[in-house]
Amino acid sequence: MAALLVSLPLQIACQIMCGTNSTNNNLNCFDNTPSFQQHAPLSKGYVAFPDIGRAFKSYHDKEVTWDEARRRCIENGANLAVIDSLTTQDYIMKVKPAMSSAHVGIHRFFNGEEWTSVKNDPLVSSLPWAPYEPTYGADENCAFMWMDGRGLAAGNCYKNIQHFICEIPI
């Protein structure tokens, strides 16, 4: 057996002699294989969706303006949720109360035409807008999600009060 062990790579020789985390006569063996790294536990109320790398939390205790919703998310180390695909929209529908519209992290403050996210990511033109949206009223510069999940809509950032969804990366 000694001749065989000399010709094998060290890692394989150790596996033959020890197996995993065992003792063979005077030789102690331990498995040094890297293990899966667990992320820190999510903050209370967040629901994780690992395939998109985000977790969402619905705040439906009080209706607020878009700017107040944005501020509250930031205070809690998050952003207003950015619904940038139908998949994300479907996940948000699982988190928010069924009959509740919600502010989301999409706006057009900079030039009044181009919708962008609160993370300043340029958004593609294929946002999941509801039928006949977005509207282009002069005071409709923030997006919200319709209560029934039919998509996003443009609304007044300072007059519309609703619930909101925050997101954190995972």
Image (spheres, rainbow, N blue to C red):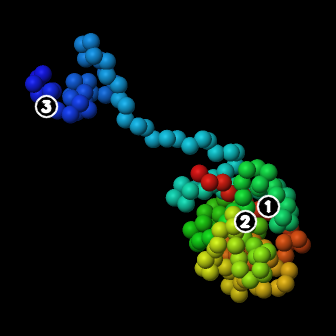
Q: At numbered mark 3, what does the secondary structure look like: helix, strand or loop?
A: helix
Furthest-right residue in this view = 159
Give residue 7's mark.
3
Residue 6 place in picture, x, y as percent: 15, 27
Q: Which residue is located at x 79 percent, y 74 percent?
A: 109
Give whichever of discs 2 and 1 has the lower sequence position. 1
Give whichever of discs 1 and 3 has the lower sequence position. 3
Q: Amino acid at mark 1?
A: Arg
Q: Which residue is mark 1?
A: 70
Alpha carbons under labels 2 and 3: distance apart: 59 Å
Residue 129 place in picture, x, y as percent: 67, 79
Position of residue 38 relative to residue 149, above or below, is above
Q: At numbered mark 1, what does the secondary structure look like: helix, strand or loop?
A: helix
Q: Which residue is mark 2?
A: 118
| Quarter of the figure with residue 13 | top left
Alpha carbons under labels 2 and 1: distance apart: 8 Å
Q: Which residue is located at x 17 percent, y 32 percent?
A: 8
**Circle 1 residues within 10 Å: few <14, some 14–19, many ≥20:** many
Q: At numbered mark 2, what does the secondary structure look like: helix, strand or loop?
A: loop
Position of residue 103 relative to residue 169, above or below, is below
Viewer-nearest of labels 1 and 3?
3
Residue 140 place in picture, x, y as percent: 82, 79
Q: In which quadrant will I find the N terminus? A: top left
- In the visual, does 133 lie left or right of 48? right
Position of residue 27 relative to residue 159, above or below, is above
Residue 31 place in picture, x, y as percent: 35, 29
Question: In this orientation, which residue lies closer to the viewer: 38 or 164?
Answer: 38
| Quarter of the figure with residue 44 | top right
Furthest-top residue in this view = 26
Viewer-nearest of labels 2 and 1?
2
Question: In this orientation, which residue lies closer to the viewer: 137 or 13?
Answer: 13
Give whichever of discs 2 and 3 has the lower sequence position. 3
